[in-house]
Image (cartoon, rainbow, N blue to C red):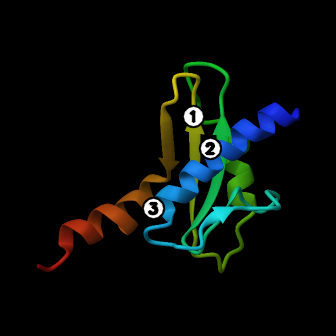
Amino acid sequence: MTTEKKDIGTQLEWVVAKYLQPIEPFAIPSKNSERSDITSKLFRVECKRWSKKNVIIDKKIWDKILSQMTIEDTKIPILVQSNTSGDIFVSIRIDDFFRKFVYPAYLKED
């Protein structure tokens, strides 16, 4: 990977880390992306920057995220992707989305 491509990927990782920092002050890009691109207590984050306008969920990338998880792992796997237009998308399993985010927010007592 060229230094320029690595820098672009690192920029996306910092954007994601900044979004996480209000709930996880120590969320930062990982020094060793063998485990995940972002060091986080809540999420296993993989970031991908596409050099085209359309992005896809590459099954190999998703499988890589899942293969890094152990049975005891409670982190939520997410895939963050950006395109040449600067759009950033987050992919998450439907079960995680509803059970961890939608239902708790909807059922939250006031």
**Tag nearer the camera, 2 or 3:** 2
Q: Which residue is mark 3?
A: 96
Mark closest to the chain's N terminus, 2 or 3: 2
Question: Is 27 placed left or right of 66 in the picture?
Answer: left
Q: Which mark is residue 12?
A: 2
Q: Mark 1 packing: few (<14 Cα in 10 Å), some, or many (20+)?
A: many
Q: Amino acid at mark 2?
A: Leu
Categorize mark 3 by other alpha carbons within 10 Å: few (<14), some (14-19), many (20+).
some
Taking the image as shown, residue 42 lies to the left or right of residue 70, namely left
Residue in the foreground of this view, choosing between 109 and 31:
31
Amino acid at dot 1: Ser
Q: Secondary structure at mark 2?
A: helix
Marks 2,3: beta carbons within 8 A: no
Q: Nearer the viewer, residue 30 or 96?
A: 30
The reply to whether callout 3 and callout 1 are in contact (CB within 8 Å) is no
Q: Residues within 10 Å of mark 2 (few under 14, many from 20)?
A: many
Place residue 104 in its image quadrant.
bottom left
Image quadrant in which the C terminus is located: bottom left
Which residue corresponds to mark 1? 82
Q: Which residue occupies the extreme left position in the image? A: 110
Q: Residue at x 49, y 53 (%)?
A: 93
Badge 1 vs badge 2, beta-carbon distance below 8 Å: yes
Q: Earlier in the sequence, mark 1 or mark 2?
A: 2
